Amino acid sequence: MEKPGQEATLSIPMHKGKDVKRGTLRDLIKDAGMTVDEFISNL
């Protein structure tokens, strides 16, 4: 996923059979310089 004008490399934790926790996902979205709405619209 890319956001024009932003460059970020993020590691998304993947554990077999488990979802990423809500707080972890929000932190990753914030680190990427995005809002939750921007992230959702790009899914």
Image (cartoon, helix red, strand yellow):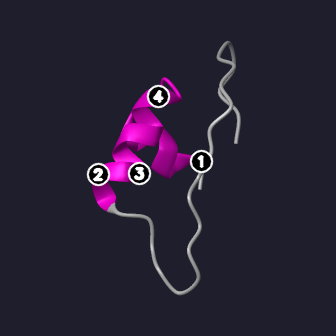
Disc 2: which residue:
23
Which residue: 45% across, 74% down?
19
Which residue type carries mark 4?
Asp
Quadrant in which residue 20 is drawn = bottom left
Where's residue 37, x and y in %?
Answer: 39, 42
Segment colored magenta: 22-42
Which labelled disc corresponds to residue 31? Answer: 4
In contact (CB < 8 Å): disc 3 and disc 4: no
First-in-chain label (4 vs 1) = 4
In contact (CB < 8 Å): disc 4 and disc 1: no
Which residue type carries mark 2?
Gly
In contact (CB < 8 Å): disc 3 and disc 2: yes
Give me the C-alpha separation between circle 3 and circle 2. Answer: 5 Å
Which residue: 48% across, 23% down?
33
Disc 1: which residue:
42
Q: Kindly state the secondary structure of the residue where label 1 is placed.
A: loop
